[in-house]
Image (cartoon, grey):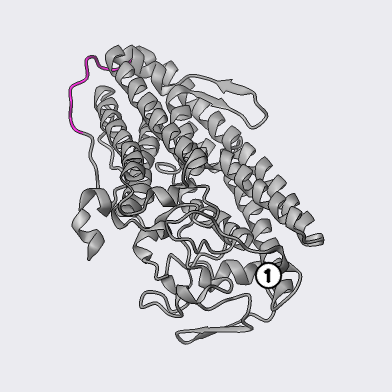
Amino acid sequence: MQRRSLAAGLFLAPLVAPLLPGRAALAQGTAPDQRAVRRFYADLGQAMFEDSVTAAKALHQAVTDFLAAPSEAGLAAARRAWIAAREPYMPTEALRFGNPEMDEREGRVNAWPLDEGLIDYVDARYGTESDENPLYAANIIASRSLKFGDETRDLSTLTPALIEGLHEAAGVEANVTIGYHAIEFLLWGQDLNGTGPGAGDRKFTDYTSGDNADRRGQYLKIVCDLLLRDLQDMLDQWLPGGAVRKRLAAGAPAQVLTVMLTGIGSLSYGELAGERMKLGLMLHDPEEEHDCFSDNTHASHRGNIRGMVAVWRGEYRRLDGSTIRGASLRNLVDRTDRRLREEMDARFAATEAAFDAIVQRATTKEAYDQMLAEGNKEGNATLQAGIDALLAQTRTIERVVAAMKLPAISLEGSDSLDDPGKVFK
């Protein structure tokens, strides 16, 4: 299957908050409240990444156990652990945009889609070359050297430095060698079902017999090690003394509000509504599905919504079942314009309902990639309802920015929303 590298990138079309008059200016006397919101936002980031690290450790252990004695049951357990590890990570993406320390690290842990032929063997239908990617089917696991341009890499021994050094090799974003989706591919293999039922179906014997079984296991262990290291690095930025904590504490409280609204606005609009949903729906292409090997996309998208709601409400349910609560954007907006707060609450509730419907359909009737299929009117409509809810939510986020008299923000964009004609060129 030929893959378009377009979806691996983001289109930074500015979406500027309209200069709508707020019902009331945010009073100067609420500055302490803004500082409380700032503090809890940092606490929220720390809690989310602590949970992500905890779940990644469980994934690491499951993979370690599987590789020690590969079996069908061990592979199934590793897959379950991967899905469980996605649950706490996906809400953290609400913290990505607006926090450069997160955005610059996100590509190491959650880059997608990937040209999987760079990593391992692929089905003949995948093809052997791409005009956009000279390493489209390079197969690191099977190769002992790799040449691109004037450079030749020695692949005889797989090491962390080697594998991460090939991440986005040749300047191609789809050359993803590390992170959640590299692990996903190594656990599930390709999903060769198109928009039909079924996910990837890699056999555990890929790790016991045949060509390169040992190297495949070495690769899987290395990328699990790197994921855990990278998530710990992200967590460190939110801990006391970390870069994010220090920057937030040093900035004016209102600047932190701008960061928070940029984060949930960009995830709502260009990233989730655009690149992760509308693009695939326009193309009816399962290759544009976020968790395309495991058919876990519905859960990952719902996790993004949980993260945005947590930032808005100042409330987060932790992996251990406990809940943390603190000062929130919602509190501040309520004091500025209660009707606007009610509107924002209603927008988030509508978005949650739309994505609950996607999850319900994905778990009872058909997977996300089947919903993308051309001619699947009900499935397409279910996904479009989620997109529409995100777009309405974004418009209200813009109104919040204006009502709180914050500087206009620029949100991540997507050609699928901003200039649909470009998608088909």
Image spot of residue 237 (x, y percent)? 56, 43
Image spot of residue 131 (x, y percent)? 36, 78
Image spot of residue 7 (x, y percent)? 37, 59
Q: Residue 408 versus residue 283: which sits nearer the camera?
A: 283
Q: Determine the residue located farthest toward the right in the rendered image.
A: 69
Q: In which quarter of the image is the N terminus?
A: bottom left
- Count of labels shown? 1
Q: List the residue tagged with mark 1.
A: 216
Q: Is residue 358 visible?
A: yes
Name the residue at 60% across, 33% down: 47
Q: Which amino acid does label 1 sit on?
A: Arg
Image spot of residue 344 (x, y percent)? 33, 23
- Tell me where the magenta segment starts and ends, as one range: 18-28
Q: Can residue 252 be seen in this view?
A: no
Q: Is residue 79 above or below residue 320?
A: below
Name the residue at 39% across, 67% down: 3
Left or right: residue 223 compared with residue 393: right
Q: Residue 392 versus residue 194: which sits nearer the camera?
A: 194
Instruction: Reply yes or no: does residue 353 show up in magenta.
Output: no
Majority secondary structure of magenta residues: loop
Instruction: Reply yes or no: does residue 24 show up in magenta.
Output: yes
